[in-house]
Amino acid sequence: MRFLPVLLIIILAPLLGGLITKIKNNLRMRQGQSIFQPYYNLVKYFNKEEVVSGTSSWIFKMAPFAIFASSLAALFYMREFLALIFIFALGRFFLSLAALDTGSTFGGMGSSREMFISSLSEPVACLACFAVSLQNGSTDLLAWKSLPLANTSALIAGVALFLVMIAETSRIPIDNQETHLELTMIHEAMILEYSGRSLALIEAASYIRQMIWLLIIAQVLLPLTDPVGISGSQWLLWSCWYAARIVIVAAVIALLEIAVAKMRLFRAVDFFGFGFVLAAIAVLCAVLGY
C-alpha cells in the first residue's frame, strides 16, 4: 500500500509544476503553455540523444541517477522531516559535484551559489521543524497530523518553511527558473551541460522534490488528519480538501513570483535571516504553548 501513494506523487509531480506556470501566465493575462507541458518536456528529453562534455568524468554521468534516487528515497522517508533534509542535501551535493566536473564556468558559479544558499536555508528548515515538533512531540510527519487545527507556532513555522521552499525549488526571489542570464542563474547554471535522459532525470527529481515540500507546508499551515473511520462522501470531501490545500500553496507561489523581483545574491542573507527569526519566534511560541 505504501507504493501506491509514492507512485501517485511521482505521476502528479510534473502536473503541479505545470499548474504553477499556468497560474502565473493567467495572472499575467497570457495564454501560456499547457498545464501538461512538463510531461511533454520529459518525454522529449528521454527521446533525445545525450551530449557529454569531453572534459567530464564518470561523476557527470552518474550524478543524474543519484539525484533522482535521492528524490525517490525522500518519498519513502517522508515520515521523518530531518531525514528529508539530509536526503535533499545528498542530491544537492551530487548536482554541485557534477557541475564542477565539467570544468564549465557556469557550472562552477552555479554550484558555488547553491552551496551558499543551502548553508542559509537548512538551519531555518531545522529550526522550523523543531518548533512544529515541540507541539507534536516528534519530528515524524505522521505525528504532525494529530492536531486538527494549526496553532500560532505552527503557522509561523509554516511561513518560515515556505521561505525555505522558495529556495529549495529555485524560485523567485532567490532564483529564477525562466532565465539563463549569467548574473541570475543558480540551479539552471548547474544543469546547462546536461541533455537527453540525464536532463529528464534531473527535471523529474526537481518536480518530486517540489511536490514533497508543498505537501509538508500544506500539512503545517492547513493540517488534515488521516481519514480513519470515514467512507463514501466524507472520504471524497477529504480527498478534495487534501488536493485543494496543495493548489492553494501553489497559487501563493505563483502570485509571489509575479509580484516580486529577483533579489541580489547577497540579499539572500537578509531573506533567510528573516526566516530564521520567524522560526525562532515559532519555537518560543511552542515553548509557551501557543
Image: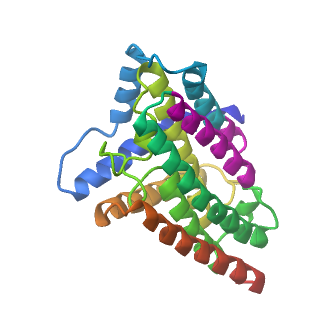
Most foreground residue, 255 or 188 = 188
Does residue 158 appear to the left or right of 76 in the view shown?
A: left
Give above or below for 206 relative to 288.
above
Most foreground residue, 251 or 235 = 251
Q: Residue shown at 59%/76% (left/top)?
A: 278
Q: Residue shown at 68%/60% (left/top)?
A: 225
Does residue 138 appear to the left or right of 145 in the view shown?
A: right
Q: Indicate the quadrant containing the C terminus: top left, top right, bottom left or bottom right.
A: bottom right
Q: Is residue 233 visible?
A: no
Give above or below for 1 relative to 172.
above
The quarter of the displayed image where residue 159 is located = bottom right
Does residue 288 appear to the left or right of 179 in the view shown?
A: right
The residue most toward the right is: 137
Which segment is the magenta one?
73-101
Give above or below for 152 relative to 223.
below
x and y percentages locating residue 105 in the rendered image: 41, 37
Most foreground residue, 262 or 56 = 56
Q: Residue shown at 49%/23% (left/top)?
A: 198
